[in-house]
Image: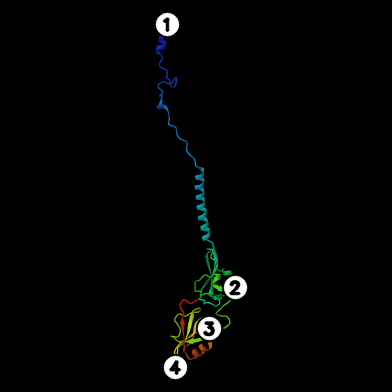
């Protein structure tokens, strides 16, 4: 009996010390995994990035919508000199982008027709309230409108309504040693036309009443010339 019991113990294999009942299992450091640090989450940064994306998209959308906003404004199509009335035929309606500039609306054209230009308004100008006034220094008391029939050489080429001119006395050949002089340092051209059947140019000017008699007298003898003032208005 003792011999058989000993034989049974000798035939049993070694017992695994790491995992009992698992023959050949690895033990020690080779069976251990390295710890993985938990992923760090930053919800604040993610939220900020999302807000930036949404904000950029919103700004782009607003710009597109804003660029499509159009308003009706008044555009000047005829030159208007300082002090001259803003006539209805000198205005036209245009559609422009709403940029926030205070252009006068086309709906106010009747009120504008009762105003006068403060400065020279050139064709293509978009009208603002600062460009017009309710009163005119040029057409007020003490001013006279004179019609002149001028020949070639007495009127500048390209003269048009709204221009500022100087009125000059140019003595004729029969005046001897008479010298030319300035009759009016500045005058406003009210209209420009051509006399039918002649080469004379018809020009209406607005001048002070104090010099109008002399201008009319010299004009009747053909001794008047006009000089366009550069940069006037």
Q: Nearer the viewer, mark 4 or mark 1?
A: 4
Is residue 35 toward the left or the right of residue 145 in the image? left
Choose the circle earlier in sequence order: 4 or 1: 1
Q: Quadrant of residue 106?
A: bottom right
Q: Which residue is mark 2?
A: 111
Image x and y of residue 13, in percent: 40, 16
- Residue beneath label 1, please? 2
Q: Nearer the viewer, mark 1 or mark 3?
A: 3
Residue that lies at the very extreme toward the top in this rendered image: 1
Answer whether labels 4 and 1 touch (C-beta < 8 Å).
no
**For mark 4, does the 10 Å Cα neighbourhood hold few (<14), some (14 to 19), or many (20 or more) residues?**
few
Mark pair 3, 4: CA separation: 25 Å
Gap in angstroms between the C-alphas marked 4 and 1: 170 Å
Residue at x 41% of width, y 7% of height? 4
Of the residues under marks 4 and 2, which one precedes in the sequence?
2
What number is the disc on residue 207?
Answer: 3
Residue in the foreground of this view, choosing between 189 and 8:
189
Callout 1 secondary element:
helix
**Residue at coordinates 41% horizontally, 25% vertically from top-left?**
28
At x 53%, y 87%, the residue is 212
User: What secondary structure is marked by label 4?
Assistant: helix
């Amino acid at each position: 009996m003792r011999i058989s019991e000993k034989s049974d113990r000798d035939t049993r294999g070694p017992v695994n010390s790491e995992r009992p009942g698992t023959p050949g299992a690895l033990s020690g450091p080779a069976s251990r995994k390295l710890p993985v640090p938990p992923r760090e989450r930053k919800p604040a940064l993610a939220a900020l990035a999302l807000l930036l994306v949404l904000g950029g998209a919103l700004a782009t959308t607003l710009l597109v919508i804003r660029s499509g906003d159009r308003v009706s404004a008044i555009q000047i199509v005829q030159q208007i000199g300082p002090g001259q009335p803003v006539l209805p035929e000198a205005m036209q309606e245009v559609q422009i982008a709403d940029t926030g500039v205070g252009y006068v609306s086309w709906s106010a054209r009747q009120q504008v027709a009762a105003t006068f230009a403060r400065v020279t308004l050139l064709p293509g100008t978009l009208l603002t309230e600062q460009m017009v006034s309710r009163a005119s220094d040029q057409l007020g008391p003490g001013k006279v409108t004179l019609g002149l029939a001028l020949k070639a050489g007495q009127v500048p080429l390209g003269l048009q309504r709204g221009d500022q001119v100087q009125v000059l006395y140019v003595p004729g050949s029969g005046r001897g040693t008479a010298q030319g002089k300035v009759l009016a340092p500045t005058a406003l051209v009210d209209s420009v036309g051509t006399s039918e059947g002649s080469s004379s140019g018809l020009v209406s000017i607005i001048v002070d009443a104090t010099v109008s008699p002399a201008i009319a007298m010299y004009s009747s003898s053909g001794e008047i010339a006009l000089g366009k003032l550069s940069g006037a208005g």
